[in-house]
Amino acid sequence: MNWLIINVVSWMLFFFGAAFPVLILLKAIGLTGFMKVTRYESYHTFYYRMNPSVKIILGIMVMVVASVTIWWIGAIMTVAILSSYLTLKEGKRKFITGMFLTIMTVIGTTWAFAPYTPYVILQEAFHNSHLTTLWVWPSYFTVMGYQPALTTQGLIYGFQISMRFTAVSLMSLVLVMTSTPSQVLRSLNKVGIPTSLTFSLVVAMRTVPRIFEYIDTSVKIQFMKGLGSNAPSIMRPFYMLAGAFSGIVPVIVFLVRGAKDTAISADTRAFRAYSKRTYMHPMTIGKVDKMALSAVILIILMTVIMVMMGFGKGISYNG
Amino acid sequence: MKALEIQNLKFFYMGREEPAIDIEHLSIEDGETVLITGRSGGGKSTLVNCITGIIPHVFHGEFEGEVNVYGKSTVKTPLSKLSTEVGIVLQNPETQVLNYTVEEEVAFGPENLCLESEDISERVRESVDITGTSHLMDRETYTLSGGELQRIAIAAVLSMRPKLLILDEPTSNIDPEGTAKVFDIIRKLKEEKTLIVVEHKVERMLPFVDRIIVIDNGKILLDIKSSELSHYVEKMVEIGIEVPIHFIYARQNGIDSEDMDTIRERLRQINMIPAPPKRAETSRVVMQAAVSVSTKAGKKLVDGEIELQEKQILAIMGRNGAGKSTFLKGLMGFLDIDLNCEIQAALDGRDISREHIIKRGKEIAFVPQNFDLTLISKSVELEVAYSLKKRKVKNYMDRVDKLLDMFSLSDLRYRDPLSLSLGQRRRVAMASAMASGVKVIMLDEPTSGQDYFHKQVLGKELTRIKEAGYSIIIVTHDSRFVYRFADRVVVFNEGRKVLDGTPESVFMESRQYSILPPSDFILRSDENELVNH
């Protein structure tokens, strides 16, 4: 009996880590929720007035700082950037969506590290040879790369690692939600990236929200046709995930059929006629950009000081 | 000066032995407005692609002959240089609009030409003025209606200041109001540019065009002055092109006139007014549904109800944004989770309001406008069997065979659904949606982007399905299709049902909601009644 319980609970924990974040996200915000955080909407607050180049610099800065400093600096940046979502158009909704995305990134990353991280690393990270065991996995779990047991330190370690990703993901979404692809194209062209390359990015930025919309339709039609009809309703998020995978091929075929028109539309409007383009509104550096760049410089200085004070070690993450 | 000169043009797509287009000679004078029409797949798009230079610059294949636009060879001139001579607006505005904001979209072309920012602004202003879209400048393109988006697509091409403008089925995906605005633009541009319009709506285009060219099987079948159309009615109908119905009756009854009122009067005198299409008789109510949709902020988007009878085709019409598709999606549980949706629905007297989409889908089928998204299986047979397998129906192959037979898909049963033609794909989507034994089938904009021939095929299919015992709801803008095939029409306006009745009674009053009665109806109507309404 004991053996059975251990196995059942272990497999439940395994699936929790693999599927729970995605399933909760699908339940909470739906596929169309992804569409909303990957699509530009015009508005007037500071992010929208900021030059996309500055936003790209900010994003790079956040990534560098999160990866060279201690975990709680990443956590502070996450909270700060997430709070700034409230200034976006429909800020409250985007804040909640961003929060869900963050929580799920934390759960997903924690679970991706906690059971796998070798004890020797945990001992070094926590300056402690004694690890607190929370759950002992069945011995065959080691085949999947699991350590023999799940430890408190493993979970904390995973959590701390997740702080490397959360701030930068939130900042990337700020760029997507507050800059049009054309603005991004202008910024990238200005630093010498060829138009043909940046145009692919522009088309991608325009296409990604549509992918979520079309997959959502495909999944709903599959449900209508009986997908998951004999399963309990608690299993529906799993079927939604399965339906989303099944919908990928028709969605791609559908998009590729439309891509022909996109190519014609660009080519017959002199796209790539010259190696450079001019713009109706040339990019300028305004007051908001100067403030943001000042913030970037401040962050760089603080990061240097932090690193010098010893808060910049990759390990240990708990300082 | 000649705007277009084609000599001995032949183009073969890769791997094809027959040419997709084969034109010995064609020329269009500067300032002419020409309608190119013909069945889908007949070669119209290939021809315009040759004129714009897309063939051979973008689409490759075997190209023979000479195509010159304002003296420039489309083969030897780079596409970017041709773009100021010839511009093209495509059928589907959603796929041709590249940018997020209207201003960026219209400025895209001039920016590619490396013009000064003042020049770009001037061109953008000029283009949005012509198309009447200056009020949309600050909008995101994805928030626009189909009609608005198409006008932006036209503005985006006009900002290149092409001398020759090609509009490839510019109204096939938009509502009557949007269509009327596109025709207004064509009327304005006719004075300034050489225009080639590829269109199935011959009747609507007649007042604007000087010439009509009919393309079929890659060849020019007819090249006539627009005033000569009535003499070629039989030939056009034979090819499968939609022509004004009064022309057909005038021709059949030896009436030498093109005026609707005169023809109707003469037909009445000789007692030859055709009988109206047969409508299904009143039968028992299969489904009653009331749907109310609002935003989280409380704004009502839809608040309407419908009643569907057994063996009936019910059409839902209205302007873009009137709430037709939202009504259907609300009823099926397809709406965004950000919207509040309340449903009161009964099917055969059984309350289905609270049923999950899985259960509701067992009795109500929904075929969306983008039906390709529903085709997830590797073969037609598996696609049709999908629902039966998922619902664990025993011995389901008999039912699959029947459906394949019903939709003429038996010969295609092992083919990949996505590799089939448009009409075949739609039939697979319908057969698959109906497989679990549904009673009601709902189709969102099934006529959108279809030519006359395919619309006739669709209408006949729906009639056959109806006669087999099913009840059908279609959302459409096509009043001619509705007049011919629907038994009842419901018109939505600003989210509410405003008209409900037979096509005859609804078309009497539908103009106020931007739904133009088709010529089929006007021909059969009493002149006094029409005037009174």
Image: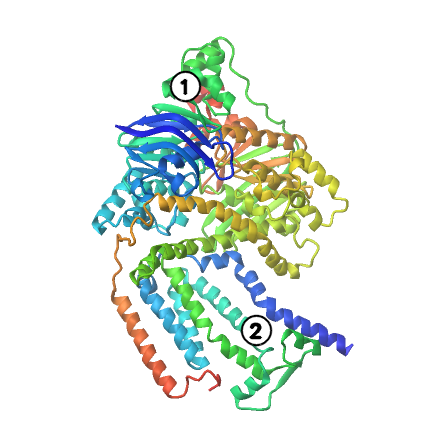
Q: Distance between the residues labelled 1 and 2?
A: 71 Å
Is there any visible trace of residue B132 in the rendered image? no
Q: Any mark on residue B274, and which?
A: none
Give the left or right position of residue B471, taking residue B480 as reference.
right
Is there any visible trace of residue A182 in the rendered image? yes
Residue topped by disc 1: B229
**Residue ID at (48%, 84%):** A315
Q: Where is residue A268 in the image (x, y as percent from the top left)?
A: 35, 43
Coloring scheme of the render?
Answer: rainbow
Q: Where is residue A187 in the image (x, y as percent from the top left)?
A: 31, 61
- B283 or A294: which is nearer to us? A294
Residue topped by disc 2: A112
Q: Examine the rendered structure and indicate whether residue A278 appears above or below residue B282.
A: below
Q: Which amino acid type is marked by label 2?
A: Ala
Q: Examine the rendered structure and indicate whether residue B172 appears above or below residue B140.
A: above
Q: Examine the rendered structure and indicate whether residue B58 appears above or below residue B470.
A: below
- B120 or B129: which is nearer to us? B120
- A2 or B504: which is nearer to us? A2
Q: Examine the rendered structure and indicate whether residue A32 appears above or below residue B286.
A: below
Q: Which amino acid type is marked by label 1?
A: Leu
- B395 or B476: which is nearer to us? B395
Determine the residue located farthest toward the top in the rendered image: B270
Task: Please rate how many residues cluster around mark 2, counting C-alpha atoms within 10 Å: few if below 14, some from 14 to 19, many from 20.
Answer: some
